[in-house]
Image (cartoon, helix red, strand yellow):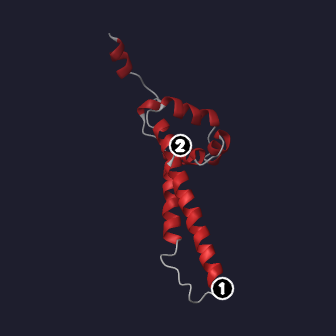
Amino acid sequence: MTLSDLKQKRRGRPSIEEIPLPPHVQRALVLRGNGSSWKDAAESVRMDYRTLRKYVRDHPDANNFLERQPQDALDQSHSRLIAAAPLSFDLSECPKPKAGISTLVKFCSLWSSFLECSLTF
């Protein structure tokens, strides 16, 4: 009997590496990726933080999932900002056109600096 035969005859619960990443662990990793502590992220899905850390250490997909979360959150925020941004500015109804233009210039300046910062991630 070889070592591979013993592994095939093993009974009981499968190890972390052998199962797909569970949805509750994915939710906890999303929270962790968005800035929550390990303990808060784990408690929000009713698991111990040590178990969550064990998933990240042992599961082949967990670490990649966790590393991808900040970029996904950033992409979603960009989409929301772009969807909420006005496509055109009508300054004819503005009681103080110069104030409207300066506000528009400030907005464009902030927007471009925001985009430059987010592209460095």
Q: Is residue 94 visible?
A: yes
Q: Nearer the viewer, residue 100 or 10?
A: 100
Number of marks in picture: 2
**Quadrant position of the N terminus in the picture:** top left
> Callout 1: 10 Å neighbours few (<14), some, many (20+)?
few
Give the residue displayed 35% in from the left and 22% down from the top. 8
Give the residue displayed 55% in from the left and 44% down from the top. 29
Image quadrant assignment for residue 97: bottom right
The numbered disc on residue 25 is: 2
Q: Is residue 14 visible?
A: no
Type of the residue with mark 1: Lys
Q: Are marks 2 and 1 in contact (CB under 8 Å)?
A: no
56 sits left or right of 46 in the view: left
- Residue 71, placed above or below residue 51: below
Type of the residue with mark 2: Val
The numbered disc on residue 67 is: none
Mark 2–mark 1 Cα distance, whole angstroms, equals 53 Å
Q: Nearer the viewer, residue 72 or 30?
A: 72
Image quadrant assignment for residue 100: bottom right
Q: Nearer the viewer, residue 62 or 16?
A: 62
* Secondary structure of residue under mark 2: helix
Q: Which of pointers 2 and 1 indicates the residue nearer the eye?
A: 1
Q: Residue furthest top?
A: 1
Q: Give coordinates of residue 48: x percent, y percent.
A: 64, 37
- Residue 37, placed above or below residue 105: above
Give the residue displayed 58% in from the left and 73% down from the top. 104
Q: Nearer the viewer, residue 17 or 95?
A: 95
Which residue is labeled 1 in the image?
A: 96
Mark 1 or mark 2, which is nearer the start of the sequence?
2
Q: Give coordinates of residue 3: x percent, y percent.
A: 36, 13
